Each structure stands twice: as C-alpha cells, then as structure tokens.
Amino acid sequence: MKSRFIHTAMRISQRSLSIGFLVIVSASYTLLSVGSRLLSEGFQPMTQVYMRVALATFALLLLFRKKIRWKTIRSMPRSDALIILTMGTIGYSIGVYFITLGALNAKLVNVAIIFASVPFFSYAYSFFFLKKPLDLKLTGLLILSLIGISIVATKSFTPRFAEFGIGEIFTLIATATMAWFFVGRKMLSRHLNTHEITITVMGVAAMSGLILALLRGETFSLTAFTNPHVLLGLAIGGFMNALVNPIEIYAFEHLDAVFGSQILLLENVFALLFGYLIYREMVTIPEIIGGLIVVGSVYFANKLPQ
C-alpha cells in the first residue's frame, strides 16, 4: 500500500513538473524574441543567430557529455547525415534567422500567433515526404488558420497580400522552414540518440549560420560587448536555446502529446503580456480575432486523432 502511494506521488510530481516545464518553454519562446531585439543593438540578424546557437551548443555539450557517443556520430548513415544537414540549415539556422527578422519587424504577439501554425506546415511536409494520408478535417483547419494569419498580418478583416506586414511575412517563412526540423526528426533512423541528434543539429546550425553571415557580408564587432543590452540578449539567447530542448523532451516523456501541445499555446499569452509590459505593444480588434482563429485551429487540430 505504501509503495503504491509513493509510486502515485512520484507520477503526480513528474506530471506537475512537466506541466511547469512546458509553461517555462512557452515563456522562453517569447523571451527569445526579446533577446533578438536586444542583440540587434550590436549584431546583425544572422550573426546573432550563430552566436547564440553556438553558445547553446557548447552548454549542451557540457550537459550531455556522458550521453554522446562520438564514434556513433562519425559512423552515421549517409541518409541521416543529409537529413541532419537540412535540419540544421533549413530547419534551424535559416528558420531562426527569419523568426529573428519577424521579432524585429512585428509585434511579439503576432510572431507567436503565426508561429503557432507550425503543426500545419509539419502536416503538409508529412503528406508529401512521409506519405501521410490526406485528412480533410486537418486540411480544413489548415486553411482556416491561414485565413487567421492573413487577418493578423494585414490587421484587416478583408486581407490583401499587398497589405501583409514585412515582419509577419518573415515569421511565416520561419514557420514554414522550422517545421522541417520536426518532420526531419521523424525521418531519421535510430542510429543516434536524442542527445546526439540535438548536438549535431545545433552544431550544423551554428556552422551554417556562420557561413551564411559571412556570405551576407555581416561584420562582427567586439565593441558590441560593451553594450549591456547586447550582453543581456546574448545571455537570454544562449541560456534559453540550451534550456528549452532538454526540459521540453522531459515534459513530453511524461505528458500526453496533445495535452502538452495545448500548454505550449500559452506562448501567445506570454507574447501579449511581454509585448505590452516591455514595449507597450497594443493589438487591434482584427489581430485579436485573427489570433483566436489561428490558436483555435491549432487547438482543435491537436484534438484530432494522430
């Protein structure tokens, strides 16, 4: 009887801890946008991307050092290597680059609302690359979410493409590219464990970000480190990138995937709160209605049988 009570208490504790972790993750996504704005005072977009990803990769190397098998990484199949390469470049560095541009040019809440539609892009990629069957309900919710995104991006109930805000367009591109990260994860074999996948993908992201920054002609200025806002932004970016991945993995190990996905929708609440408190960002009625359409679409999509 006593052992059953202890087992139940531990299960409740793990569930409560997991819920708390996902609330932290929800807030972290918005804080990453705040960090991007702070870093923009000293560094151009792609430069700040590879800096904070490299910092997070180093932190995770220290954290996961006993769980990484370097010989296994070096002997990964060519197909896995190609997928990891695309996950790190398209799904991570390029995706983070565009989400950074979105955060610099749009309201925090609009970035969060549009990015909430990432499951629909994952569904579209799964249909084409993983041969998932066509789901008419999910397709209908996808179309509905795109209508909501259009209302948010144009701040009008009669949206036209010419009226799309540049920040919202950047965020939509980020949503489409970062969705590949999740689909690519499903395409990998079991050769690498989760920690090895995380490290290799983030390492590729840091290197590809550096190469893209050089190709774009971005410069690196040491004087930027004298700006306290830049240092705070780098601390937020590096810490949050390192924190989010392991605690999100832990949370979804102990929570139902659908329930966990619903908790992550709290990002929109945090974005609205931080946007107002830090930047005095106000939302219009069309943005509120469009946001409710997008979040509602994602909520009901998560309820559908997977």
Image (cartoon, rainbow, N blue to C red):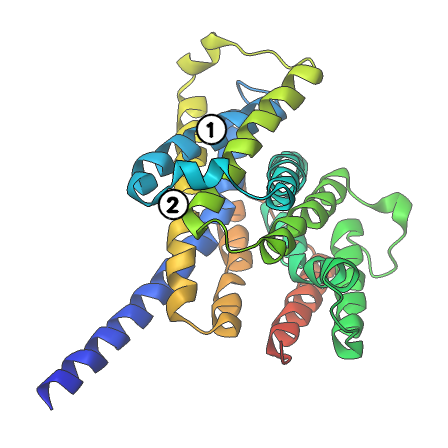
Local crowd size for mark 1, using a 10 Å CA cut-off: few (<14), some (14–19), many (≥20): many
Look at 31% across and 40% down and name the residue there: 63
The circle on residue 161 is: none
Total marks drawn? 2
Q: Dot 1 corresponds to which residue?
A: 54
What residue is shown at x 74% (from left), y 73% (from top)?
Answer: 138
Residue drawn 50% across the image and 29% down it:
38
Q: Amino acid at mark 2?
A: Leu
Q: Seen in the image, is 281 located left or right of residue 157? A: left
Contact check, label 2 and label 1, Cβ < 8 Å: no
Residue 278 seen in the figure: no
Give the mark nearest the N terminus, 2 or 1: 1
| Quadrant for the C terminus in the image | bottom right
Q: Quadrant of residue 241?
A: top left
Q: Where is residue 263 shown, x and y percent of the image? A: 48, 66
The structure residue drawn at horizontal position 40% and vertical position 36%, both measured from the top left corner, is 70
Residue 285, by quadrant, is bottom right
Residue type, mark 1 in image: Ala
- Describe the element under mark 1 as helix, strand or loop: helix
Give whichever of 301, 126 is nearer the camera. 126
C-alpha separation, residue under disc 2 versus residue under disc 1: 14 Å
Residue wearing tag 2: 243
